[in-house]
Image (spheres, rainbow, N blue to C red):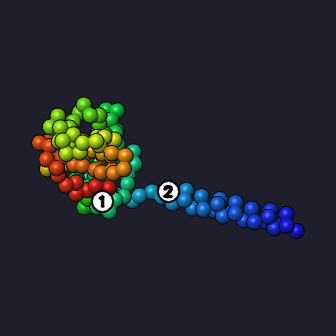
Amino acid sequence: MLIKTIVITICCGVMCLILHDCNILANSQKRIVVPTTVENAFNTKYSRNIPRSWELHYYGYKANFIENGIKYEAEFLANGQWVETERIVSEKEFPEVVLQKIKEKYPGFIVTKYEIEITPKGVFFEVDITNGEIEDELYFDEKGNLATDLYED
């Protein structure tokens, strides 16, 4: 009787896990419905590219695409207004003034990610930094001044 109870309990547990995983898979495969205004805005700005995927964010939509072998993310408000396009880069692509500011203001921190963000207000430089205990994200303008990223996801 004890073995039968154990087998039934294990089977029920396995079934619950399978159903849970199926639900997660079904939810992850739901297609995001992108408004026509956003699709049109993307097509106008990046007519030679097709988004590989779209993501929904609290402020709007993000299109992931590749141009000349480089991965980009273009972000739009729900009304189709373009807000930024970003890509991950290496340290070599950052202005020396920005790198110097990071070293001065955050000694002991290392940069774990470099991004260039092109916005209607200009080009900005974003980094993720850590010292092993603290992690932070910094956003600089071209002159090395700290700025605010309004559309951080």
The one of 76 and 109 positioned closer to us in this rendering = 109
Q: Is residue 135 left or right of residue 93?
A: right
Q: Which residue sits at x=22%, y=49%? A: 139
User: In the rendered image of this protein, does residue 6 appear above or below residue 136?
Assistant: below
> Does residue 43 appear in this view?
no
Residue at the far right in the pictured view? 1
Callout 1 crowding tier (Cα within 10 Å): few <14, some 14–19, many ≥20: many
Which disc number belongs to residue 60?
Answer: 1
Tell me the quarter of the picture where residue 131 sits.
top left
Q: Nearer the viewer, residue 41 or 120?
A: 120
Q: Residue 24 occupies which quadrant of the picture?
A: bottom right
In the rendered image, which residue does mark 2 sit on? 28
Q: Amino acid at mark 2?
A: Ser
Q: Amino acid at mark 1?
A: Gly
Residue 32 x/y as whole percent: 41, 58
Crowdedness near tag 2: few (<14), some (14–19) or many (≥20) residues, C-alpha within 10 Å? few
The reply to whether discs 2 and 1 touch (Cβ–Cβ < 8 Å) is no
The percent position of residue 112, horizontal first and vertical second, equals 34, 41
Quadrant containing the C terminus in the rendered view? bottom left
Report, in whole angstroms, how far the alpha carbon at label 2 lies from the one at label 1: 19 Å
Residue 78: x and y in percent read 28, 61
Q: Which is more N-terminal, label 1 or label 2?
A: 2
Whether residue 144 is visible here, answered yes or no, is: yes
Quadrant containing the N terminus is: bottom right
Element class at badge 2: helix
Residue at x 34% of width, y 59% of height:
57
Question: In this picture, is 101 found above or below 120?
Answer: above
Secondary structure found at label 1: strand
Q: Residue at x 85, y 63 (%)?
A: 3
- Residue 87 point in image, percent of width and height: 29, 41
Rendered residue at 19%/55% (across/down): 148
